[in-house]
Amino acid sequence: MAAWFTEYHAQGCGLSLEIKEILHVEHTPYQKLEVVDTVSHGRLLLLDGCVMLTERDEFVYHEMISHLALCTLPAPRQVLVVGGGDGGTVREVLKHVDVERVVLAEIDLAVVRASQHFFPTLASAISDPRCEVYIGDGVTFLAQTAACFDLIIVDSTDPVGAAAGLFQPVFYQLAESHLTSTGMLSAQMESPFWHEDFIRTTTGHLRQVFPIVELATGFVPTYPGGFWCWALASKRYSPRGDFLAARAQRIEGSCRYYSAEHHLGSLMLPRMVRTLLEP
Amino acid sequence: MAAWFTEYHAQGCGLSLEIKEILHVEHTPYQKLEVVDTVSHGRLLLLDGCVMLTERDEFVYHEMISHLALCTLPAPRQVLVVGGGDGGTVREVLKHVDVERVVLAEIDLAVVRASQHFFPTLASAISDPRCEVYIGDGVTFLAQTAACFDLIIVDSTDPVGAAAGLFQPVFYQLAESHLTSTGMLSAQMESPFWHEDFIRTTTGHLRQVFPIVELATGFVPTYPGGFWCWALASKRYSPRGDFLAARAQRIEGSCRYYSAEHHLGSLMLPRMVRTLLEP
């Protein structure tokens, strides 16, 4: 008997993946965590039944949420990742040799542990000496720290439950106050195919706080619509106008999706996405 | 009871759509044709069980296969569409007022009839006086005609069965001989996520015939991986270097996906696609 998992992206529409083996099921204090081996996509991490990542396509998401910002900022040294306990974003951030320190603020220790056990190619960078793990709420971390960052990456789950606060104006104000005067925020921003209203509202929140707000799009086949976007909110540097191709060229050899060429391409939006940014 | 349709994109992976109503089933001389009303994507056209288009996302495919070429050529007057019996590509082509004539060479009359009945927003342009319908094999049409075209669009099904010949060197030679000295060919080129070998081989065939070959990527949520691409093969004009923004600006108001901005963006490829074009 073949066993299948289906994630429903909207009423009447879903992605179905055949399961080889259920490797791990755990009820953490925050969510249900499952690790499943699939026929087509390698290992799959589910949180509360939603696809977080698969081994086959995680590189797109993690490269895009990291390098668009890190190849715009001339000297990013201090980086905060809110969420992202799987370690994929930290892995990308630490490709930049000038990053001195990345703080991973993940609310759920079980995500970090499961990733270290089941997804070593994602979690490997968590043990890098430049990475510091804080287990707790990212909002609490920011409210209590005096530290300032060159880049804050919001690598969260969908904007429901524990993650909902990470898409609100009060959080963006808090993040802004912990960014250097040339700092930037990079955040996953859901699917332009299914979540138009969310994107319009949330980029509006960002614009209340940051003078420069751009969207980039990318293909994540296992996310709703296969069509994802990320917001870049910046105090001074524009991901388009201030893009530093030499920085991108230094790391693109280690990337499968991001490149100097595609940096700008991903910001030149389809019309249906550009209109979401119009006031 | 809810009824679902699943198209399998690879072993162990598929897109599932809930069916409201089966509107039409027909065994044509060439294929099984089905029209289904879905909960999430409006009406769906299936040929031999594969998703050809849905009302909800067809605009991406049809805009991309048409306007990238038509906004690069300075004066496209004569256009041939091979396949495309649903009429969506003809609808986009005829947005360009300088196009004097478009020949729709569709092998299966049943596709045209089903589209006219069930998809009037796609098929409406087929009755435009500038559109001439030829029911028959596109290869036969080209072999027998003395006509030359400014643009040939290969709007075919997947490269199996009747459509397989449309991706072979002998067809590209034939097409080249029926293009003007500045002519261009635009063709759907499958998914960079699932069909890497096909894309590498087929763009290689195109390069044997055309001096300029580019790929563009786009999001088609109901196609495998949600991640599709199109090839642009050209005798003289480059879709990047010779892009005519003014032509794009004239039609982009009638588009939902294509725009002057995204024309260039869609050609600035993710690394995993750029490498498919490397010899």
Image (tube, coloured by chain):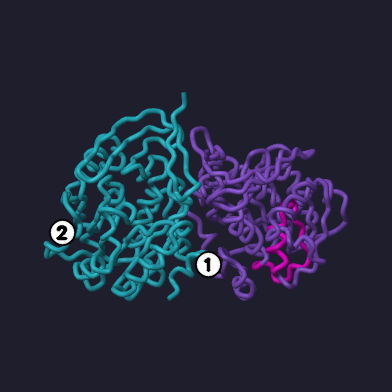
Chain colours: A purple, B cyan
Quadrant housing residue A247: bottom right
Quadrant housing residue B174: bottom left
Does residue A133 lie above or below A198 as drawn? below
- Left or right position of A130 against A239: right
Q: Specify start and end residues of the magenta stretch as a single range.
A: A71-95
Residue A103 placement (x, y as % from top left) = 80, 58
Residue B262 placement (x, y as % from top left) = 46, 59
Q: Mark 1 lies on which chain?
A: B
Q: Mark 2 lies on which chain?
A: B
Residue B208 shown in magenta: no
Q: Is mark 2 on a helix, strand or loop?
A: helix
Identity, as a three-letter code, of the amino acid under mark 2: Thr
Which numbered marker is on residue B140?
A: 2
Residue A76 shown in magenta: yes
From the image, tell me which residue sits under label 1.
Answer: B271
Does residue A118 lie above or below A27 as drawn? below
Mark yes or no: residue A114 visible.
yes
- Left or right position of B171 against B145: right
User: Which residue occupies 22% across, 41% down?
Assistant: B28
